[in-house]
Image (cartoon, rainbow, N blue to C red):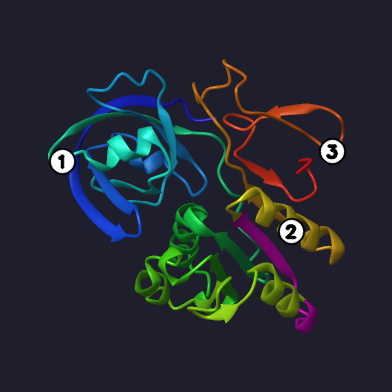
């Protein structure tokens, strides 16, 4: 585990991605070089009566101290965060949690992203390519209810990966649930594969089932309430399939396929 830091950072860039999605880039964050795909930060909401920090997956970092999060407004905390003006100060605690394990170079990488679960997976794809992985060995399946839930399309496409958008209403890409074309891909390939997924619990359960059904290893990034982010409050405990329990914030949020009872 990396020893985290608490930094006061400045909101350097704010982008409204539409449909209640936002991208915030903060600077400087002193431990950006320690950040890895799958890590998250705990953000203290400034000038509010909300006591607990909010966890956000890291979407990207730069060598000169920038750290980006992408979020959707779901409740009071994220609504207040969205109102933060450029130049505002926010305290970040991180990096926290465990990161993804990179695949072997001879494995086809299957990324299954759902809704706002895509940021850590985009970060994973970027870092894989930076480490010399062939972009065409990365298959990025991205699901949402409508086309408005498939954000940063051009950004993902620019990576050169195989991009498969899926929407439940058919307004963009393939119509249906994202795990259906994933299963079709697995069935049609005789290559070694590895799955990485982040998104709603139902989608994670389906991704987990696919991995077990076809003996494809991989990792899931879980989402859970994390009041403290460091394993003290026990607010994010989940049951494992071996009967024990784990804290998502520090034993995860990355878990192996078949490890957690979903």
Residue at image coords 60%, 78%: 175
Where is residue 52 shown, x and y percent of the image? 41, 21
Give the CA distance from mark 3 to mark 2.
16 Å
Q: Which residues are magenta?
A: 187-197
In front of the other: label 1 or label 3? 1
In the displayed structure, does residue 5 sit left or right of residue 110? Answer: left
Q: Secondary structure at mark 1?
A: loop
Above-or-below relation of 164 to 123: below
Quarter-of-image position of residue 104:
bottom right
Residue at image coords 37%, 66%: 152
In front of the other: label 3 or label 2? 2
Quarter-of-image position of residue 98:
top right
Q: Quadrant of the C terminus?
A: top right
Give the CA distance from mark 1 to mark 2.
39 Å
Quarter-of-image position of residue 216:
bottom right
Q: Which mark is residue 85?
A: 1
Q: Nearer the viewer, residue 159 or 163?
A: 163
Q: Per the image, is 205 magenta?
A: no
Circle 3 packing at 10 Å, graded few (<14), some (14-19), many (20+), is few
Going from N to C along the chain, the mark reached first, 3 or 2, is 2
Q: Quadrant of the N terminus?
A: top right
Circle 2 packing at 10 Å, graded few (<14), some (14-19), many (20+), is some
Going from N to C along the chain, the mark reached first, 1 or 3, is 1
Whether pointer 3 and pointer 2 mark residues with C-beta atoms closer than 8 Å, the reply is no
Q: Per the image, is 189 magenta?
A: yes
Residue at image coords 71%, 29%: 246
Residue at image coords 84%, 38%: 241
Give the CA distance from mark 1 to mark 3.
44 Å
Residue linked to disc 3: 241
Residue linked to disc 2: 206
List the single residue furthest toward the bottom. Answer: 188
């Amino acid at each position: 585990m990396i020893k985290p830091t608490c930094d006061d950072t400045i909101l350097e860039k704010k982008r409204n991605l539409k449909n209640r999605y936002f991208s915030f880039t903060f600077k400087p964050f002193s431990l950006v070089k320690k950040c890895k795909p799958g890590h998250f930060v705990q953000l203290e909401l400034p000038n509010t009566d909300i006591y607990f920090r909010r966890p956000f997956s890291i979407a990207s970092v730069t060598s000169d101290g920038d750290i980006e999060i992408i979020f959707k407004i779901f409740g009071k905390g994220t609504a207040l965060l969205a109102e933060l003006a450029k130049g505002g100060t926010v305290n970040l605690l991180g990096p926290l949690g465990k990161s993804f394990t990179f695949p072997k170079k001879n494995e086809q990488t299957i990324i299954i992203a759902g809704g706002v679960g895509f940021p850590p997976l985009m970060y994973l794809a970027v870092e894989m390519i930076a480490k010399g992985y062939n972009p065409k060995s990365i298959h990025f399946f991205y699901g949402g209810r409508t086309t408005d839930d498939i954000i940063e399309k051009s950004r993902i496409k620019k990576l050169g990966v195989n991009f498969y958008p899926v929407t439940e209403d058919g307004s963009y890409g393939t119509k249906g649930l994202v795990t259906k074309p994933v299963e079709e891909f697995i069935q049609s390939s005789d290559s070694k594969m590895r799955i990485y997924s982040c998104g709603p619990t139902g989608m994670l359960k389906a991704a987990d089932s696919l991995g077990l059904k076809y003996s494809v290893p991989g990792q899931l990034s879980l989402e859970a309430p994390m009041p403290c982010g460091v394993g003290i409050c026990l607010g994010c405990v989940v049951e494992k399939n071996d009967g024990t329990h784990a804290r998502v914030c520090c034993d995860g949020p990355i878990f192996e396929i078949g490890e957690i009872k979903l």
